[in-house]
Amino acid sequence: MTINLSVIDFILISPAVALFLASLLPLSLKAFRPNRETQPTTVILWALVGLVASGGMAIANFGVSQTAFEKALVFDGLSSWSSILIVVSTAFGLLLAKESLATNTKQFSELVFLILNAAAGMMLVAWSNDLIMLFIGIEVMSLCLYLAVALSLEQRLAKEAAFKYFVLGSFASAIFLYGVAFIFGTSGNTFLLELSEVGSELISTNRLFLFGVVMVVVGLAFKVSIFPFHDWTPDVYQGSATPVTAFMAAGVKVAVFVSFLRVMATQILNGERAEDLIFALEWLTVLTMLAGNIAAILQSSVKRMLAYSSVAHSGYVLMGVLAAGVGEQGELGASGVLYYVLGYAVMTLGSFGVLSMFEKNEGTDLEVTDLKGLASRYPIAALCLSLLLLSLAGIPPTVGFFGKFFLFSAALKQGFFWVAVWGVLSSAISVYYYLRPIVYMYMAEGEPLQAPAGRQLSKIVVTVCAILVVVVGLISNPVYDAIRKSVAGMF
Amino acid sequence: MLLTTLVFLPLFMAGVLLLVPNEKVLKPMALGFALVEFVLSLALFLRFDPGLAGLQLVERSAWIRSAGIGYFLGIDGISLWLVLLTTFLTPITILGAWSAITKKVKAFLIAMLVLETTMLGTFVAMDAILFYTFFEASLLPMYFIIGIWGGERRIYATLKFFIYTMVGSLFMLLGIIALMFYAQDQLGYMSASLVDFYKLQIPFVAGEFLSTQTLLFFAFSLAFAIKVPVFPFHTWLPDAHVEAPTPGSVILAGVMLKMGTYGLLRFSIPMFPEAASYFAWIFLLIGVVGIIYGALVAMVQPDIKKLVAYSSVSHMGYVVLGLFAFNAYGISGGLYQMLNHGISTGALFLLVGMIYERTHSREIARYGGLASAAPIFTILFMIITLSSIAVPMTNGFVGEFFILLGTFMSAKGYALFAVTGVVLGAAYMLWMVKRVFFGEKGELVKKYESHGLDVNWREILVMAPLVVLVFWMGLFPNQFLRWSKASIDHLVENRLTYELPVVGVPSNPSSYVVQRAASASKAGE
């Protein structure tokens, strides 16, 4: 077997390479000057240079549609969008991290190294055409994240979170790999694009193939915390330093849901005997939405509440994934999913950003009641958090509303009527807990908490996210059209 | 551009208020803005042609092209008066809140103006998604108005208000999406415009709940029934009203409840004509139950404001009854009653607020003999009471008379029961008036008499336009109804095959729809 590598391949993966190279710089600076901590500002500047380069390359690659490295990676509209989203999430996450007490420590260069590499891993996940490549991407991403979670200065919760995430995550990876083995054994290849030619037939004729697919789906479902694989989410989100949580919540969802879409694009759900799988996925969707939203109501910590809400949002997106996999017009579901994760990334980064702004020391969670009277002392931060929460709740005209609109449309179009009704019911439940922080910020009396001085970068990030949430919502047309055009041909 | 200006001017003005640093000029500025808005809305009379049934002053451009969602505004005889009601009540409310709102004045005025934009948008939006956007967005300012400036249990009340309304409207969202796909199937292009929705033929199977048209009809009607609110869904209303500050109650009762009945008239009845006819009995029934139940519960309320709140349930029951009578009398009576209710209940809330500011209590039992302590206030209150209980020569009479007439023509049995509401209405209002204003002087009146309980010049100025309208609308109903007649007649005559022609725009679908159709057929290949 000869290996053909062309220059174009290397240009195509340049966004990930740029992140990797940029991640080495701060770490080697530290290695060459032992015991001298590099200024966080310098570190972050290097990282931003890498991110800008990576984002630039990703934009330059827009409109490409081809595979690279012997079909291991595929570059199409989905890839470009997810690269850009991952770069933006990473940049926002790092800016927040620079100012957070839990991360701005003597190990800051290590943290930046880990985050940048996690981002590179996410890109691999989103680009993979080969299931083995997808596994490597997931591992790169996850290993970096386990460490990044553990690096938080906080002693107890962060270590617990990292350990929990590591153990459960490893299990999920193993299950995923097990599934890949079955798929390879029955179909003879691991390339998603080639599986799409035989997938719908194999799933009806071969039980072992179906088993493999189920295992792969379970592995992916774990990463995006689909019920019943969601139990790690609140603990890990709570235990990690808030900026890491923000980055993790946004980036992992973008990457894994994109690869979920790629798995669905193999037409496996259109096979004759796929009804059971569809049925199971429908129930997972419904239960994920309900479990996330109902559990979120019971939380008093804002961070845990947002963690459970992220479970619920995974449920909404899974509805779109399902719609993308079934029937003829999958692109409606796929573009809904992409639009939603775009909106979700912005909303999550922003709302965790607000929390990070107000955290006094590592390890103390903000309770919902701590927010009382916030609007009188920090009107802009309160307004931003309100907009972000309203968008998470799906109130028009924010991006969250249009995201839900596109997802529900896709689900109704493909005939998932009851799933959409449950989606509607559970988002009605969610309104309650999203409004609670707003109630405390604006309506409760009390001495508002004092934010630590400075943190200008966090303020900028939060404001930008809040503005984006409204603007992308109001002018959703160009964004949605661009997304739709880029996923067209895929399904 | 008139409608766009009308809708977004208050939002722009709210932005201007945000930049004003001087606390003292805020209220006069906001009042001035609201008056400018009202005067601007009077320009509608110059541009609107009452002889035409179609949609006028249309503005249309694409918003989300690929889903056929447009920025589509238009006005017809049905929405014309609701727009004017909104622009009319807003300055009155701001002037009425002059001394009631003392903290966070700027935020309050901004909320009021934003609320005005969303309410106007709801009434003139002719695209379902645009309508939904305004309909939902209008919850937010009201949520803050109740939650920040409300009474003790304000947070409970405002959450209840928000979540109740939200639950209903989410089902409407599913309904809208379903209709958009129907448009794609039947018209060849995806569209969220109401004009296109009216053209759809939605399959209806009588007696089967799970048939498409029935489900859609209930998905929409539930949202509006909660908003109105009709009988079994009304429990949020008394809470919201009791806790809301006076201006909040006025706008909530005066305008926001009408979004529900407007929705029934604009969506449920013409879009799903077979289901609406088949299930009309449900709405007639809950209308009648609402009338009687609201009146009976109002009778035993110890709190004046709660009494007025329950009287709203009763009055809105009339509106629903009129709309589902499906004839010109019923529907024009329903429309008229929406305006009456906005004026008389709004005025009642203002009056209750005025006396509450002075005595800090709304308990009926602690009043008594107010008439001699506050004669002008008593006169104003009496006039509004008469309007509320529909005494001839006041606006209330015209509305209730038309509604009962219309119901008698189409559904006699319901009308017989509804008539008792007229008696009950008089009973609870007059009994309350008797206990508050006449008889021995109560403890509150004795205590505060020396402080001066009567209204001041500002408050007279607030009430004057309302009192004038009570008689104007009562004596010359035709001056008001003639503007809506064409639209209502058009709806009644063509109810089963309703279509809304667009006036002043060539009859072929506007350009973006054509483009969309072309791209859709391309995708189909």
Image (cartoon, grey):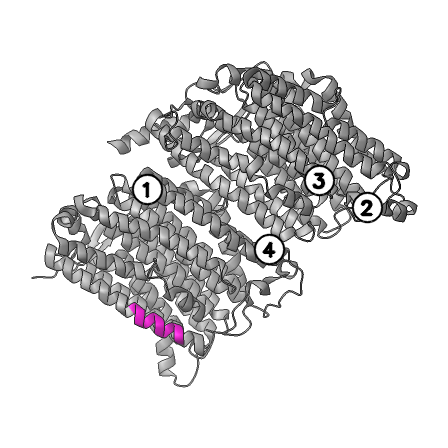
State how far apart marks 2 and 3 are (Cα): 15 Å
Q: CA distance from mark 2 to mark 4?
A: 33 Å
* Total marks in image: 4
x and y percent of residue B292 in the render? 63, 31
Evaluate whether label 2 is on the same chain as label 3. yes
- Which region is colored magenta? A160-169
Which label number is shown at residue B203? none
Compared to residue B507, the image places residue A251 above or below, namely: below
- In which chain is the residue bearing label 4? A
Disc on res. B300? 3
Asked whether the beta carbons under mark 3 and mark 4 sit within 8 Å of each other, the answer is no
Numbered badge on residue B366: 2
Q: Looking at the image, which residue is at 51% across and 54% down?
A: A434
Residue type marked 2: Arg
Residue at position x 24%, y 39% from top? A328
Cα separation, mark 3 vs mark 4, equals 32 Å
Within 10 angstroms of label 3, few (less than 14), some, or many (20 or more) residues?
Answer: few
What residue appears at the point 48 percent right and 64 percent down from the top-left corner?
A303
